[in-house]
Image (tube, rainbow, N blue to C red):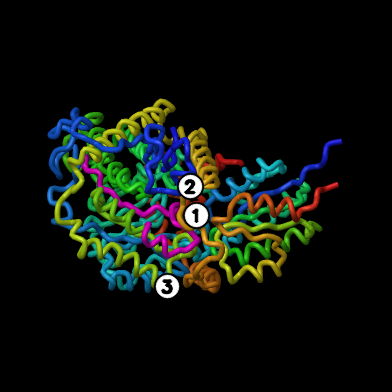
């Protein structure tokens, strides 16, 4: 299916040059960003088969099409949550305190890439990357520094990590502060989709993602019931070119993998297992389609939980979603244009009923956010919350013939795509076989060629491009001293800690992993013994091996 | 007699996991008739080793993290150490305008910040890289 967001016309040049002028009538086909044909006008006939009570209903009631909570933003505004982190735990701590003071209501920890791949700062392979694109966190000491002075008993924290190591550190720090883990609020990313799309060294295979995440969900269901133990995350996949319904298809195919794994294990009742599932999607360019996507997603999740798994607990069927403006739509040319793109995308997230939103920095395509762009992101969301009136009523587009019809179309295509993946044996297998990456690859190549031809218009890049960049924006550069600072701290830690206790804790972790026990207790013991992130990740790699990235040109 | 084709190694030094730019430029160069070796994510020494083994004429690097000021000179140094200092090194990704002079001094032949039309990159190779004999 055609994924472009363009008009298809037999006379492309004339429509492009004269957007206001009608093209040659019947030959013009308008497609959504996901290739769904869009009519010139919608009428009641387009929603004739919609049963309001069954398919739409009231917010807070299954199938939750209009919103997961009864009062939505009138009861509680969405959380403003920007993923951030840079340089060192010290500098990032300062940043988080500033964000909190500005009224950001949730923290979101972006680890740097060396932390993401499970390498310590003193690993010779990482020197150039420490403190780039996130905060390095090598041990519980770094986590203590990162959280210093922050009221983690009051804020909710998102940790962009995999396999639960950083969350183990977070919980251990909370425990040392005398806090009750059962009361902590936050989210651990933990989704195989988000990580396996990246071409990174030290990757564990998809099956390992499944194992560690399911262990973590089981553990949280008992010990941290207010924590969201997983955020099923299609953001990166969307940014790699999948369209809106493909995004929903892979998202829900992934949830089914996790539920089926727990069903096989039988350790935790399914209603408790899925109660705290949460989601993370992109907000892309096609405004109405993105709103319809979130509406369709809510209905689909409710159906999966109630109809497929027979789970009646209403909390389980609520599609609670964090939305982030789509980085791949942001340009390095004329970066201020991104402010406008981001505002529209965030508005789509709001009209789509998201629980939490990250407005990217306008400089997303240039560097990590500067202080100024960070401030603008937060203000973008606050202006929507307090000035525009968009929160006054719930699901304001519900009942629009176009919106309801588009929601139905997206749902239909998404079920088909999901079925295709299930027919392959589920998401983990579809990743392991390289099929999903082939989808990414094809989508990427297609997008590039359509961008080159102008079929996908990007203002300031391939449309109305200026010969010379009209302005420059301030640039953020990571501190080149960060790697050295981190390496020295880690060296001192390695000298100071009880190495016998470290070795023993890692041995116990490896045994638990190989035996098939839930790894969380042993992981928490290891971080408390000051085992480093790299040492724990190495246990995971020893057990599961390194997964070769399936794209090779 | 068939002409020997220009050989290009495309790689990403450092850890960062973006791959779209590398793949898309690799395809464009392959479509333009060049022999492209897709290296993916590699450390600078590996890039240099592969450049020698594959006897390439061009090394294309893609970096979207601000660490190119360290990784690019490192890669060029590794190439020189192996007697491969004569290859044409191209750099794409997120590259700040004010760093371009310094990168060129370090030996980068062509710099193509994200958003550069693919045709410009192909043209650059066509105009500046000599046909191997």
Disc 2/disc 3 C-alpha distance (Å) = 30 Å
Residue farthest toward the top in the current orientation of the protein: A423
Residue A252 occupies which quadrant of the picture? Answer: top left
Dot 2: chain letter:
A
Q: Quadrant of the N terminus of chain B?
A: top right
Where residue A319 appears, as percent x and y from the top left, is 25, 44
Disc 3/disc 1 C-alpha distance (Å) = 21 Å
The answer to whether dots 2 and 3 both sit on one chain is: yes
Q: Marks 1 and 2: in contact by CB < 8 Å?
A: yes
The answer to which of A517 and A354 lies nearer the viewer is A354
Q: Which mark is residue A548?
A: none
User: For the point 32% across and 55% down, which residue is it?
Assistant: A344
A206 versus B42 height, above or below: above
Kindly state the secondary structure of the residue where label 3 is placed. Answer: helix
Label 3 neighbourhood size at 10 Å, few (<14), some (14-19), many (20+)? some
Label 2 vs label 3, nearer the camera: 3
Kindly state the secondary structure of the residue where label 2 is placed. Answer: helix
Range of magenta residues: A316-341
Residue that badge 2 annotates: A540
Residue that badge 3 annotates: A91
Residue that badge 1 annotates: A118
Task: Indicate whether residue A317 is drawn in magenta.
Answer: yes
Label 1 neighbourhood size at 10 Å, few (<14), some (14-19), many (20+)? many
Dot 3: chain letter:
A
The answer to which of A171 and A90 lies nearer the viewer is A90
Q: Earlier in the sequence, mark 2 or mark 1?
A: 1
Q: Earlier in the sequence, mark 2 or mark 3?
A: 3
Dot 1: chain letter:
A
Where residue B34 appears, as percent x and y from the top left, is 71, 43
């Amino acid at each position: 299916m055609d994924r472009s967001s363009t008009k298809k016309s037999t006379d492309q040049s004339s429509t492009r040059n004269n957007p206001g002028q009608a093209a040659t009538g019947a030959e013009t086909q308008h497609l959504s960003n996901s290739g769904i044909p869009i009519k010139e006008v919608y009428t009641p006939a387009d929603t004739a088969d919609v049963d309001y009570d069954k398919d739409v209903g009231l917010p807070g009631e299954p199938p939750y099409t209009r919103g997961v909570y009864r009062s939505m933003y009138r009861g509680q505004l969405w959380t403003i949550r920007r993923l951030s982190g840079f340089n060192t735990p010290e500098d990032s701590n300062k940043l988080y305190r500033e964000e909190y003071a500005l009224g950001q209501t949730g923290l979101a920890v972006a680890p740097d890439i060396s932390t993401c791949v499970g390498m310590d700062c003193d690993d010779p392979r990482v020197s150039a990357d420490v403190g780039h694109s996130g905060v390095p966190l090598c041990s519980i000491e770094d986590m203590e520094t990162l959280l210093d002075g922050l009221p983690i008993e009051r804020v909710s924290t998102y940790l962009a990590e995999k396999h639960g190591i950083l969350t183990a550190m977070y919980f251990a720090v909370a425990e040392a502060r005398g806090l009750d883990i059962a009361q902590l609020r936050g989210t651990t990313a933990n989704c195989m989709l988000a990580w396996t799309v990246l071409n990174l060294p030290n990757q564990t295979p998809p099956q390992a993602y499944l194992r560690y995440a399911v262990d973590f969900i089981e553990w949280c269901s008992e010990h941290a019931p207010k924590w969201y133990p997983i955020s099923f995350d299609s953001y990166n996949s969307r940014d790699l070119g999948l369209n809106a319904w493909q995004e929903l298809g892979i998202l829900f195919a992934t949830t089914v993998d996790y539920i089926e794994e727990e069903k096989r294990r039988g350790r935790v009742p399914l209603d408790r297992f899925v109660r705290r599932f949460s989601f993370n999607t992109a907000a892309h360019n096609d405004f109405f389609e993105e709103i319809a996507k979130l509406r369709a997603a809510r209905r689909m999740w409710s159906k999966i939980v109630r109809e497929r798994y027979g789970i009646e607990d209403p909390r389980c069927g609520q599609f609670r979603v964090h939305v982030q403006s789509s980085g791949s739509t942001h340009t390095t040319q004329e970066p201020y244009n991104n402010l406008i793109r981001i505002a529209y995308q965030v508005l789509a997230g709001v009209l789509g009923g998201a629980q939490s939103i990250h407005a990217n920095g306008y400089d997303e395509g240039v560097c990590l956010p500067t202080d100024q762009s960070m401030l603008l992101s937060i203000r973008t969301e606050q202006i929507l919350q307090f000035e525009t009136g968009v929160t006054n009523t719930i699901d304001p587009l519900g009942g629009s013939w176009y919106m309801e019809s588009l929601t139905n179309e997206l749902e239909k295509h998404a079920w088909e795509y999901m079925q295709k993946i299930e027919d392959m044996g589920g998401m983990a297998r579809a990743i392991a076989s390289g099929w999903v990456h082939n989808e990414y690859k094809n989508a990427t190549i297609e997008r590039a060629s359509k961008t080159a031809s102008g079929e996908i218009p990007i203002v300031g890049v391939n449309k109305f491009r200026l010969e010379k960049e009209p302005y420059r924006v301030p640039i953020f550069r990571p501190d080149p001293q960060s790697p050295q600072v981190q390496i020295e701290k880690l060296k001192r830690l390695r000298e100071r800690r009880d190495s016998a206790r470290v070795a023993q804790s890692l041995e116990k972790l490896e045994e638990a992993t190989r035996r098939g026990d839930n790894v969380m207790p042993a992981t928490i013991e290891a971080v408390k013994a000051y085992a480093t992130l790299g040492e724990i990740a190495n246990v995971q790699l020893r057990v599961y091996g390194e997964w070769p990235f399936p794209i090779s040109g | 007699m068939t002409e020997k084709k220009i050989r290009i190694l495309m790689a990403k030094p450092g850890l960062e996991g973006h791959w779209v730019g590398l793949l898309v430029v690799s395809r464009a160069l392959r479509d333009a008739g060049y022999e492209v070796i897709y290296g993916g994510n590699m450390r600078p020494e590996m890039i240099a080793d592969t450049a020698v083994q594959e006897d390439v004429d061009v090394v294309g690097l893609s970096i979207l993290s601000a660490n190119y000021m360290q990784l690019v000179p490192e890669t060029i140094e590794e190439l020189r150490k192996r007697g491969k200092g004569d290859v044409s090194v191209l750099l794409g990704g997120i590259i700040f305008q004010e760093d371009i002079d310094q990168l060129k001094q370090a030996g980068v032949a062509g710099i193509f910040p994200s958003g550069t039309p693919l045709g410009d990159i192909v043209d650059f190779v066509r105009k500046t890289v000599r046909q191997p004999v």
